[in-house]
Image (cartoon, rainbow, N blue to C red):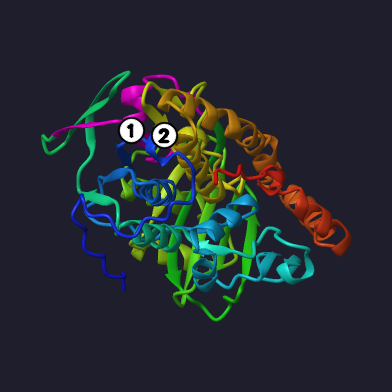
Amino acid sequence: MMPPTPPQPDRFHRGHLINQFKSIERSPCRVLITGASIAGCAAAWWLTQRNCDVTVVEQAPAFRDGGQNVDVRGAAREVLRLMGLEQAVKDLNTGETGLAWVDEDNRTAAQIDLSGLDGDGPTAELEVLRGDLARLLYEASSADAFYRFGDRIVSVEHDEAGVSVVFENGDEERFDLLIIAEGVGSRTRELVFPGENQPRRMDMACAFFTVPRAPTDSQTARWYNAVGGRSAGVRPDNRGTTRAFFNVHGRSHLAVGNSVAEQKAFLRASFDGAGWEVPRLLAGMEAAEDFWFDDLRQVKIDRWSNGPVVLLGDAAWCVTPLGGVGASLALIGAYVLAGELTKTDSIAAALAAYEYVLRPVVKKSQNVPKLVPRLVHPRSRAGVTILRAVQRLVATPFISKRAAKALTPAVQSFTLPDYR
């Protein structure tokens, strides 16, 4: 059952403010954030703590739960500690304890357990559902930020003094700063940065959805490779159900339309005869209400701000699930953006500093060779056999401990600026 949505506060109400940073009088007075997921809700929390008047607009009619498993790594855990939310996220942990690569008969070819690693590996210590993390941030910020659901921005005009927006319902309002946190396919980004995003396609389609839990499901995630550049898998959640995924390597999915019916038809055709528990997952996919399908692509854009308009999260730098740090970068990005806005004398200088601080870690996190998804999605039977041999090698204690440290080095080594 979906958790109840908290009542929206009066937009000018302010609860107890935590003055953690210096120079809050330099903060922009009125901020509009578009997008109520991890990045947008985290930014709303940080900015309301600094006495900003924050509105968050979200085109969905209500807060959106659901989504795949995400993890919080490195400096992002420190962000949660500063917010006082680390324990709350731990309490929402999916309980995933490791990853097993399996064959068509569900025999384990190789396995990496979190308990055998020094820190995070393919499974992180803080493994949580996207919707649970976003809802936690939403509820933490909604006492002081005004959330405007069922609406979106249709027009943006800006100058040095601020931003004028027109909402779909016809309202026009003026803000000091607009933060675009809508995700990889952001429409508002195209209004302000038309044609500037040059996406880097990873040549893979990915689908996520929830299926009923089966006797073969456990707290260990399972990954299965089929010939033809296909993979499927299951991961535990904290709801008594199972999160499933399909991956298809190549570009055949680019001809698929935007309707869920067309996307599911593509996956049925792509995974016909794939073996393992794929028939069960296909059947569960048909009934899934949280089905998500996308072409994996990174956002590549030369600037993150245009006047008093700034990009945040996947709208600025989508890494794709292949990078494994999307949620972590969203949390870190929100912290740095708010910190620079309260530290720096002008919005323009703050946005420049925000980009200067984050560009290096984003660049490193996006540095996923396109060869990687190809290698882990072999097309031949011989290729799958070789892949399983490599997986067994990687799963050995000597290699797995070293490989785990190399999974997300940029986020793991990033040091949070101190804005206190």
Report the residue that reaches farthest toward the left: 170
The x and y percentages for residue 200 are: 55, 29
Callout 2: 10 Å neighbours few (<14), some, many (20+)? few
Q: Secondary structure at mark 1?
A: strand
User: Label 2: which residue?
Assistant: 255
Amino acid on which the number 2 mark rests in the picture: Ala
Q: Residue at x 37, y 55 (%)?
A: 17
Q: Which residue is mark 1?
A: 178
269 or 132: which is nearer to us?
Answer: 132
Where does the magenta region start and end?
A: 172-200
Check if residue 248 falls in the magenta segment: no
Q: Nearer the viewer, residue 10 or 306?
A: 10
| Residue extending furthest toward the right | 398
| Dot in front, 1 or 2 | 1
Viewport quadrant of the N terminus:
bottom left
Q: Secondary structure at mark 2?
A: helix
Q: Which one is in front, 398 or 39?
A: 39
343 is higher (above) or lower (below) than 379: above
Q: Residue at x 57, y 63 (%)?
A: 127
Q: Amino acid at mark 1?
A: Leu
Q: Classify residue 93 by image quadrant.
A: bottom right
The picture places residue 334, in percent across and down from the top left corner, at: 47, 44
Q: Residue at x 23, y 34 (%)?
A: 153
Q: Inspect the magenta stretch and tell me whether residue 190 lies in it.
A: yes
